[in-house]
Amino acid sequence: MSMMSARDRVSRLDRLDPAVAGPGEVGTGLTDIRLLRGWLDSREAALACRQDELAATIGAAPAVDALGRSGKTSRRHAARITARAHALDASPSLSTALESGTVSADHADAFAVVTGSVDDRVRERIVELDTEVVSAATDRTPEQFRRHLRDLVRQLSDDDGIDRSEQQRDEARVSLTLDETSGMGVIRGELHPDDFQRVNRRLDAEINALRKQDRHAGKRRDQLAAIALVDLVCGQRATSRVPAEVIIHVPLDAINGAPGASKFGEYLDGAPAPVETIRRHACDANIIPAVLSGTGQPLDVGRAQRLATRAQRQALRTMYRTCAIGDCPISFDRCEIHHALEWRADQGPTDLKFLFPTCSYHHHRLHEGRWRAQLDESTRQLTITYPDGTRHSGSHPDLLTHAS
Protein backbone atom coordinates (compact mmCIF):
# COMPACT_ATOMS: atom_id res chain seq x y z
CA MET A 1 0.00 0.00 0.00
CA SER A 2 1.09 3.64 -0.39
CA MET A 3 2.52 5.80 2.39
CA MET A 4 -0.79 5.84 4.28
CA SER A 5 -1.31 2.65 6.30
CA ALA A 6 -4.30 0.34 6.00
CA ARG A 7 -5.34 1.38 9.52
CA ASP A 8 -5.38 5.08 8.50
CA ARG A 9 -7.43 4.39 5.37
CA VAL A 10 -9.98 2.36 7.33
CA SER A 11 -10.19 5.18 9.87
CA ARG A 12 -10.75 7.76 7.15
CA LEU A 13 -13.46 5.62 5.55
CA ASP A 14 -15.10 5.16 8.93
CA ARG A 15 -15.31 8.93 9.33
CA LEU A 16 -16.75 9.45 5.84
CA ASP A 17 -20.52 9.97 5.66
CA PRO A 18 -21.62 8.82 2.18
CA ALA A 19 -24.94 10.67 2.52
CA VAL A 20 -23.29 14.11 2.48
CA ALA A 21 -19.93 13.42 0.78
CA GLY A 22 -18.90 15.71 -2.07
CA PRO A 23 -17.29 14.58 -5.35
CA GLY A 24 -13.76 14.86 -3.92
CA GLU A 25 -14.61 12.91 -0.79
CA VAL A 26 -16.37 10.19 -2.82
CA GLY A 27 -13.33 9.89 -5.10
CA THR A 28 -10.97 9.66 -2.14
CA GLY A 29 -13.19 7.08 -0.47
CA LEU A 30 -13.34 4.91 -3.58
CA THR A 31 -9.55 5.13 -3.93
CA ASP A 32 -9.15 4.06 -0.31
CA ILE A 33 -11.45 1.10 -0.93
CA ARG A 34 -9.52 0.07 -4.05
CA LEU A 35 -6.19 0.21 -2.23
CA LEU A 36 -7.56 -1.63 0.79
CA ARG A 37 -9.06 -4.28 -1.43
CA GLY A 38 -5.69 -4.88 -3.10
CA TRP A 39 -4.05 -5.09 0.31
CA LEU A 40 -6.68 -7.55 1.54
CA ASP A 41 -6.43 -9.66 -1.62
CA SER A 42 -2.66 -9.91 -1.24
CA ARG A 43 -2.99 -10.90 2.44
CA GLU A 44 -5.63 -13.48 1.57
CA ALA A 45 -3.33 -14.94 -1.08
CA ALA A 46 -0.42 -15.17 1.35
CA LEU A 47 -2.59 -16.93 3.94
CA ALA A 48 -3.93 -19.33 1.31
CA CYS A 49 -0.37 -20.30 0.36
CA ARG A 50 0.50 -20.79 4.01
CA GLN A 51 -2.60 -22.95 4.52
CA ASP A 52 -1.52 -25.24 1.67
CA GLU A 53 1.96 -25.47 3.24
CA LEU A 54 0.34 -26.57 6.50
CA ALA A 55 -1.78 -29.08 4.59
CA ALA A 56 1.36 -30.61 3.10
CA THR A 57 3.36 -30.67 6.36
CA ILE A 58 0.96 -31.37 9.20
CA GLY A 59 -2.15 -32.56 7.41
CA ALA A 60 -4.23 -29.40 7.86
CA ALA A 61 -7.17 -28.69 5.58
CA PRO A 62 -6.17 -27.48 2.10
CA ALA A 63 -6.63 -23.80 1.32
CA VAL A 64 -9.68 -24.34 -0.85
CA ASP A 65 -11.49 -25.96 2.10
CA ALA A 66 -10.26 -23.43 4.65
CA LEU A 67 -11.38 -20.54 2.43
CA GLY A 68 -14.78 -22.15 2.05
CA ARG A 69 -15.23 -22.41 5.80
CA SER A 70 -13.56 -19.24 7.05
CA GLY A 71 -14.40 -17.05 4.09
CA LYS A 72 -17.91 -18.47 3.72
CA THR A 73 -17.49 -18.60 -0.04
CA SER A 74 -18.32 -21.11 -2.75
CA ARG A 75 -15.83 -23.83 -3.59
CA ARG A 76 -15.47 -22.40 -7.10
CA HIS A 77 -14.56 -18.97 -5.72
CA ALA A 78 -12.22 -20.55 -3.18
CA ALA A 79 -10.46 -22.45 -5.97
CA ARG A 80 -9.98 -19.20 -7.89
CA ILE A 81 -8.47 -17.51 -4.82
CA THR A 82 -6.15 -20.48 -4.29
CA ALA A 83 -4.97 -20.42 -7.91
CA ARG A 84 -4.42 -16.67 -7.61
CA ALA A 85 -2.44 -17.21 -4.40
CA HIS A 86 0.00 -19.70 -5.94
CA ALA A 87 0.42 -17.54 -9.04
CA LEU A 88 1.28 -14.54 -6.86
CA ASP A 89 3.68 -16.68 -4.85
CA ALA A 90 5.57 -17.36 -8.08
CA SER A 91 5.56 -13.67 -9.04
CA PRO A 92 6.72 -11.49 -6.12
CA SER A 93 6.53 -8.30 -8.17
CA LEU A 94 2.92 -8.94 -9.11
CA SER A 95 2.11 -9.69 -5.47
CA THR A 96 3.68 -6.39 -4.41
CA ALA A 97 1.76 -4.53 -7.12
CA LEU A 98 -1.50 -6.05 -5.90
CA GLU A 99 -0.72 -5.13 -2.29
CA SER A 100 -0.02 -1.53 -3.30
CA GLY A 101 -3.17 -1.29 -5.41
CA THR A 102 -1.22 -0.81 -8.65
CA VAL A 103 -3.00 -3.82 -10.18
CA SER A 104 -6.21 -5.58 -9.25
CA ALA A 105 -7.14 -9.13 -8.30
CA ASP A 106 -8.55 -9.47 -11.83
CA HIS A 107 -5.03 -8.92 -13.20
CA ALA A 108 -3.71 -11.57 -10.81
CA ASP A 109 -6.48 -13.97 -11.87
CA ALA A 110 -5.58 -13.45 -15.54
CA PHE A 111 -1.97 -14.28 -14.71
CA ALA A 112 -3.07 -17.39 -12.80
CA VAL A 113 -5.30 -18.64 -15.62
CA VAL A 114 -2.73 -18.17 -18.37
CA THR A 115 0.27 -19.53 -16.44
CA GLY A 116 -1.84 -22.42 -15.20
CA SER A 117 -2.58 -23.55 -18.75
CA VAL A 118 1.01 -23.83 -20.05
CA ASP A 119 3.79 -26.33 -19.47
CA ASP A 120 6.42 -25.85 -16.76
CA ARG A 121 9.09 -24.60 -19.15
CA VAL A 122 6.95 -21.75 -20.55
CA ARG A 123 5.66 -20.92 -17.05
CA GLU A 124 9.21 -20.60 -15.75
CA ARG A 125 10.14 -18.29 -18.62
CA ILE A 126 7.14 -16.07 -17.89
CA VAL A 127 8.08 -15.91 -14.21
CA GLU A 128 11.61 -14.87 -15.21
CA LEU A 129 10.00 -11.84 -16.90
CA ASP A 130 8.38 -10.86 -13.61
CA THR A 131 9.16 -7.13 -13.80
CA GLU A 132 8.10 -6.82 -17.45
CA VAL A 133 4.87 -8.69 -16.74
CA VAL A 134 3.96 -6.33 -13.90
CA SER A 135 4.70 -3.33 -16.08
CA ALA A 136 2.32 -4.71 -18.71
CA ALA A 137 -0.38 -5.28 -16.07
CA THR A 138 -0.03 -1.74 -14.77
CA ASP A 139 -0.60 -0.24 -18.22
CA ARG A 140 -3.50 -2.48 -19.27
CA THR A 141 -7.00 -3.40 -18.24
CA PRO A 142 -7.38 -6.99 -16.95
CA GLU A 143 -8.75 -8.17 -20.32
CA GLN A 144 -5.96 -6.46 -22.25
CA PHE A 145 -3.43 -7.96 -19.83
CA ARG A 146 -4.85 -11.43 -20.40
CA ARG A 147 -4.43 -10.99 -24.15
CA HIS A 148 -0.90 -9.68 -23.63
CA LEU A 149 -0.03 -12.79 -21.62
CA ARG A 150 -1.53 -15.03 -24.26
CA ASP A 151 0.62 -13.32 -26.91
CA LEU A 152 3.65 -13.71 -24.65
CA VAL A 153 2.97 -17.43 -24.34
CA ARG A 154 2.91 -17.72 -28.11
CA GLN A 155 6.27 -16.02 -28.38
CA LEU A 156 7.85 -18.17 -25.68
CA SER A 157 6.53 -21.48 -26.92
CA ASP A 158 8.34 -23.61 -29.45
CA ASP A 159 5.28 -23.77 -31.68
CA ASP A 160 6.64 -23.10 -35.14
CA GLY A 161 3.27 -22.30 -36.61
CA ILE A 162 2.68 -25.75 -38.05
CA ASP A 163 -0.89 -25.90 -39.28
CA ARG A 164 -3.01 -28.09 -37.00
CA SER A 165 -6.00 -27.51 -39.23
CA GLU A 166 -6.65 -31.12 -40.23
CA GLN A 167 -6.14 -32.38 -36.68
CA GLN A 168 -8.57 -29.78 -35.34
CA ARG A 169 -11.10 -30.67 -38.01
CA ASP A 170 -10.86 -34.33 -36.98
CA GLU A 171 -11.38 -33.31 -33.33
CA ALA A 172 -14.55 -31.29 -34.05
CA ARG A 173 -17.71 -32.73 -32.52
CA VAL A 174 -21.30 -31.82 -31.68
CA SER A 175 -23.48 -33.63 -29.16
CA LEU A 176 -27.25 -33.38 -28.77
CA THR A 177 -28.89 -34.60 -25.58
CA LEU A 178 -32.22 -34.25 -23.86
CA ASP A 179 -32.32 -32.95 -20.31
CA GLU A 180 -34.67 -35.34 -18.52
CA THR A 181 -35.46 -32.83 -15.79
CA SER A 182 -36.37 -29.81 -17.89
CA GLY A 183 -37.30 -31.63 -21.08
CA MET A 184 -35.12 -29.18 -23.04
CA GLY A 185 -32.70 -30.19 -25.75
CA VAL A 186 -29.03 -29.46 -25.03
CA ILE A 187 -26.52 -28.81 -27.81
CA ARG A 188 -22.79 -28.75 -27.15
CA GLY A 189 -20.13 -28.50 -29.81
CA GLU A 190 -16.43 -28.03 -30.44
CA LEU A 191 -15.74 -26.72 -33.94
CA HIS A 192 -12.71 -26.10 -36.10
CA PRO A 193 -11.71 -22.42 -35.62
CA ASP A 194 -12.68 -21.52 -39.20
CA ASP A 195 -16.08 -23.14 -38.84
CA PHE A 196 -16.63 -21.51 -35.47
CA GLN A 197 -15.91 -18.06 -36.95
CA ARG A 198 -18.34 -18.63 -39.81
CA VAL A 199 -21.09 -19.92 -37.54
CA ASN A 200 -20.53 -17.12 -35.03
CA ARG A 201 -20.77 -14.40 -37.68
CA ARG A 202 -23.91 -15.88 -39.21
CA LEU A 203 -25.47 -16.25 -35.78
CA ASP A 204 -24.62 -12.65 -34.85
CA ALA A 205 -26.13 -11.36 -38.09
CA GLU A 206 -29.31 -13.37 -37.54
CA ILE A 207 -29.64 -12.15 -33.95
CA ASN A 208 -29.29 -8.53 -35.06
CA ALA A 209 -31.97 -9.06 -37.71
CA LEU A 210 -34.35 -10.69 -35.21
CA ARG A 211 -33.93 -7.75 -32.81
CA LYS A 212 -35.65 -5.51 -35.35
CA GLN A 213 -38.82 -7.61 -35.34
CA ASP A 214 -41.55 -6.48 -32.96
CA ARG A 215 -42.47 -10.06 -32.02
CA HIS A 216 -39.01 -10.51 -30.48
CA ALA A 217 -38.99 -7.25 -28.51
CA GLY A 218 -37.70 -7.71 -24.96
CA LYS A 219 -36.03 -11.06 -25.57
CA ARG A 220 -32.56 -11.61 -24.16
CA ARG A 221 -29.61 -12.23 -26.45
CA ASP A 222 -29.34 -15.90 -25.45
CA GLN A 223 -33.03 -16.38 -26.27
CA LEU A 224 -32.59 -14.74 -29.66
CA ALA A 225 -29.52 -16.92 -30.24
CA ALA A 226 -31.64 -20.05 -29.75
CA ILE A 227 -34.22 -18.82 -32.25
CA ALA A 228 -31.49 -17.79 -34.70
CA LEU A 229 -29.76 -21.17 -34.49
CA VAL A 230 -32.96 -23.03 -35.29
CA ASP A 231 -33.71 -20.60 -38.13
CA LEU A 232 -30.30 -21.08 -39.69
CA VAL A 233 -30.16 -24.86 -39.30
CA CYS A 234 -33.71 -25.50 -40.45
CA GLY A 235 -33.68 -22.80 -43.12
CA GLN A 236 -37.25 -21.75 -42.44
CA ARG A 237 -37.23 -18.16 -41.18
CA ALA A 238 -33.69 -16.89 -41.73
CA THR A 239 -33.77 -13.11 -42.08
CA SER A 240 -30.12 -12.14 -42.51
CA ARG A 241 -27.99 -12.34 -45.63
CA VAL A 242 -24.50 -11.83 -44.28
CA PRO A 243 -21.87 -14.01 -45.97
CA ALA A 244 -20.30 -16.62 -43.71
CA GLU A 245 -16.86 -15.08 -44.08
CA VAL A 246 -13.81 -15.74 -41.96
CA ILE A 247 -11.89 -12.59 -41.05
CA ILE A 248 -8.29 -12.92 -39.96
CA HIS A 249 -5.92 -10.11 -39.00
CA VAL A 250 -2.25 -10.66 -39.69
CA PRO A 251 0.76 -8.32 -40.03
CA LEU A 252 2.15 -8.19 -43.57
CA ASP A 253 5.64 -9.26 -42.42
CA ALA A 254 4.16 -12.38 -40.82
CA ILE A 255 2.33 -13.59 -43.90
CA ASN A 256 5.44 -12.84 -45.99
CA GLY A 257 7.57 -14.90 -43.59
CA ALA A 258 9.95 -12.09 -42.69
CA PRO A 259 12.68 -13.06 -40.17
CA GLY A 260 11.54 -12.49 -36.61
CA ALA A 261 7.92 -11.91 -37.62
CA SER A 262 5.05 -13.18 -35.54
CA LYS A 263 4.01 -16.79 -36.14
CA PHE A 264 0.38 -16.03 -35.45
CA GLY A 265 -2.41 -13.79 -36.63
CA GLU A 266 -5.82 -13.49 -35.03
CA TYR A 267 -9.37 -14.38 -35.84
CA LEU A 268 -11.90 -11.62 -35.32
CA ASP A 269 -12.52 -12.57 -31.68
CA GLY A 270 -8.81 -12.58 -30.82
CA ALA A 271 -8.30 -16.37 -31.03
CA PRO A 272 -4.83 -17.23 -32.40
CA ALA A 273 -4.47 -18.40 -36.00
CA PRO A 274 -1.15 -19.98 -37.09
CA VAL A 275 0.46 -18.25 -40.05
CA GLU A 276 0.46 -21.52 -42.01
CA THR A 277 -3.33 -21.61 -41.72
CA ILE A 278 -3.54 -17.98 -42.82
CA ARG A 279 -1.35 -18.63 -45.84
CA ARG A 280 -3.69 -21.44 -46.88
CA HIS A 281 -6.65 -19.08 -46.61
CA ALA A 282 -4.77 -16.44 -48.58
CA CYS A 283 -4.70 -18.73 -51.62
CA ASP A 284 -8.38 -18.09 -52.31
CA ALA A 285 -9.29 -15.21 -49.97
CA ASN A 286 -10.06 -11.57 -50.55
CA ILE A 287 -7.14 -9.80 -48.91
CA ILE A 288 -7.98 -6.28 -47.77
CA PRO A 289 -5.03 -4.14 -46.66
CA ALA A 290 -5.78 -1.90 -43.70
CA VAL A 291 -3.49 1.03 -44.44
CA LEU A 292 -4.35 4.37 -42.95
CA SER A 293 -3.45 6.37 -46.05
CA GLY A 294 -4.25 6.56 -49.74
CA THR A 295 -4.96 3.04 -50.99
CA GLY A 296 -8.18 3.61 -52.83
CA GLN A 297 -10.19 2.70 -49.75
CA PRO A 298 -12.56 5.52 -48.70
CA LEU A 299 -11.35 5.66 -45.09
CA ASP A 300 -12.01 9.38 -44.80
CA VAL A 301 -15.30 10.57 -46.29
CA GLY A 302 -15.64 13.91 -44.49
CA ARG A 303 -19.28 14.96 -44.23
CA ALA A 304 -20.33 13.15 -47.38
CA GLN A 305 -22.13 10.63 -45.19
CA ARG A 306 -22.81 10.10 -41.52
CA LEU A 307 -22.35 6.35 -41.09
CA ALA A 308 -18.95 4.68 -41.18
CA THR A 309 -18.21 2.89 -44.44
CA ARG A 310 -17.54 -0.83 -44.67
CA ALA A 311 -13.86 -0.06 -45.30
CA GLN A 312 -13.72 2.10 -42.18
CA ARG A 313 -15.29 -0.65 -40.06
CA GLN A 314 -12.71 -3.11 -41.42
CA ALA A 315 -9.90 -0.71 -40.54
CA LEU A 316 -11.28 -0.15 -37.04
CA ARG A 317 -11.67 -3.89 -36.57
CA THR A 318 -7.91 -4.29 -36.94
CA MET A 319 -7.46 -1.99 -33.94
CA TYR A 320 -10.36 -2.92 -31.69
CA ARG A 321 -11.64 -6.34 -30.67
CA THR A 322 -14.29 -4.94 -28.35
CA CYS A 323 -16.05 -1.73 -27.35
CA ALA A 324 -13.34 0.95 -27.06
CA ILE A 325 -14.45 2.23 -23.65
CA GLY A 326 -12.65 1.00 -20.55
CA ASP A 327 -12.62 -2.77 -20.21
CA CYS A 328 -15.99 -3.35 -21.88
CA PRO A 329 -16.10 -6.94 -23.23
CA ILE A 330 -18.79 -6.44 -25.91
CA SER A 331 -17.35 -7.68 -29.22
CA PHE A 332 -16.64 -5.30 -32.10
CA ASP A 333 -19.31 -6.77 -34.36
CA ARG A 334 -21.96 -5.91 -31.77
CA CYS A 335 -20.77 -2.29 -31.55
CA GLU A 336 -21.86 0.92 -33.23
CA ILE A 337 -19.36 3.46 -34.57
CA HIS A 338 -19.24 6.72 -32.62
CA HIS A 339 -17.91 10.10 -33.80
CA ALA A 340 -15.47 11.67 -31.34
CA LEU A 341 -16.55 14.95 -32.95
CA GLU A 342 -20.34 14.80 -32.99
CA TRP A 343 -21.86 14.73 -36.47
CA ARG A 344 -24.50 17.35 -35.70
CA ALA A 345 -23.29 19.29 -32.66
CA ASP A 346 -19.63 19.61 -33.74
CA GLN A 347 -20.07 19.18 -37.51
CA GLY A 348 -17.65 16.27 -37.17
CA PRO A 349 -16.51 14.48 -40.34
CA THR A 350 -16.80 10.72 -40.80
CA ASP A 351 -13.03 10.30 -40.90
CA LEU A 352 -11.25 7.31 -39.43
CA LYS A 353 -9.21 9.38 -36.97
CA PHE A 354 -12.44 10.53 -35.27
CA LEU A 355 -14.18 7.13 -35.10
CA PHE A 356 -14.22 4.38 -32.48
CA PRO A 357 -16.56 1.45 -31.65
CA THR A 358 -18.99 1.54 -28.73
CA CYS A 359 -21.52 -0.95 -27.44
CA SER A 360 -25.15 0.13 -27.24
CA TYR A 361 -24.93 0.89 -23.51
CA HIS A 362 -21.90 3.16 -23.81
CA HIS A 363 -23.20 4.76 -27.02
CA HIS A 364 -26.32 5.85 -25.12
CA ARG A 365 -24.16 7.15 -22.27
CA LEU A 366 -22.17 9.26 -24.73
CA HIS A 367 -25.34 10.77 -26.16
CA GLU A 368 -28.25 10.79 -23.72
CA GLY A 369 -25.93 10.46 -20.69
CA ARG A 370 -23.78 13.39 -21.86
CA TRP A 371 -20.53 11.55 -21.23
CA ARG A 372 -17.61 13.17 -23.05
CA ALA A 373 -15.03 11.41 -25.22
CA GLN A 374 -11.61 12.74 -26.15
CA LEU A 375 -9.72 10.74 -28.78
CA ASP A 376 -6.05 11.55 -29.33
CA GLU A 377 -5.52 11.52 -33.10
CA SER A 378 -1.88 10.39 -32.89
CA THR A 379 -2.02 7.70 -30.17
CA ARG A 380 -5.77 6.93 -30.27
CA GLN A 381 -5.86 7.16 -26.49
CA LEU A 382 -9.52 7.45 -25.59
CA THR A 383 -10.41 9.38 -22.44
CA ILE A 384 -14.00 9.26 -21.17
CA THR A 385 -15.32 11.74 -18.61
CA TYR A 386 -18.65 12.13 -16.87
CA PRO A 387 -20.73 15.31 -17.30
CA ASP A 388 -19.24 16.75 -14.10
CA GLY A 389 -15.72 16.38 -15.51
CA THR A 390 -14.56 13.41 -13.43
CA ARG A 391 -12.71 10.70 -15.30
CA HIS A 392 -14.45 7.44 -16.20
CA SER A 393 -11.63 5.66 -18.02
CA GLY A 394 -8.67 5.90 -20.35
CA SER A 395 -7.81 3.25 -22.90
CA HIS A 396 -5.87 2.42 -26.07
CA PRO A 397 -6.85 0.09 -28.91
CA ASP A 398 -5.37 -3.42 -29.00
CA LEU A 399 -3.08 -3.57 -32.01
CA LEU A 400 -1.77 -6.84 -33.37
CA THR A 401 1.33 -7.86 -31.43
CA HIS A 402 4.54 -8.26 -33.45
CA ALA A 403 6.75 -11.02 -32.12
CA SER A 404 10.34 -10.00 -31.62
Image (tube, helix red, strand yellow):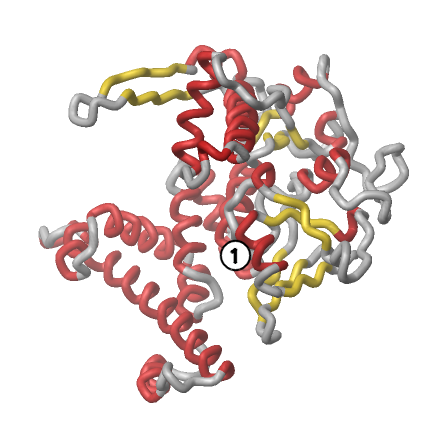
Residue located farthest toward the bottom when viewing the structure as drawn: 15
Mark 1: amino acid: Ala
Residue closer to the observer: 344 or 293: 344
> In the rendered image, is residue 45 in sight?
yes
> In the rendered image, is residue 404 in sight?
no
Q: Is residue 218 left or right of residue 318?
A: left
User: How many numbered marks have been drawn onto this rendered protein structure?
Assistant: 1
Residue 290 place in picture, x, y as percent: 77, 35
Residue 196 place in picture, x, y as percent: 50, 23
Q: Secondary structure at mark 1?
A: helix
Q: Quadrant of residue 362?
A: bottom right
| Residue at position x 58%, y 20% in the image | 162
Residue closer to the observer: 78 or 59: 78
Q: Is residue 291 left or right of residue 83?
A: right
Q: Quadrant of the C terminus?
A: top right
Q: Is residue 265 left or right of residue 62?
A: right
Give the vertical position of 281 relative to 101 (above or below): above
| Residue at position x 51%, y 30% in the image | 210
Residue closer to the observer: 196 or 362: 362
Give the vertical position of 312 relative to 101 (above or below): above
Q: Quadrant of the N terminus?
A: bottom left
Residue located farthest toward the left when viewing the structure as drawn: 59
Instruction: Assess disc 1: are there few (<14), some (14-19) or many (≥20) residues with their C-alpha within 10 Å of its C-alpha.
Output: many
Residue 63 place in picture, x, y as percent: 19, 53
Residue indicated by mark 1: 137
Give the vertical position of 284 relative to 64 (above or below): above
| Residue at position x 43%, y 31% in the image | 224
Residue 282 place in picture, x, y as percent: 71, 18
| Residue at position x 65%, y 54% in the image | 396
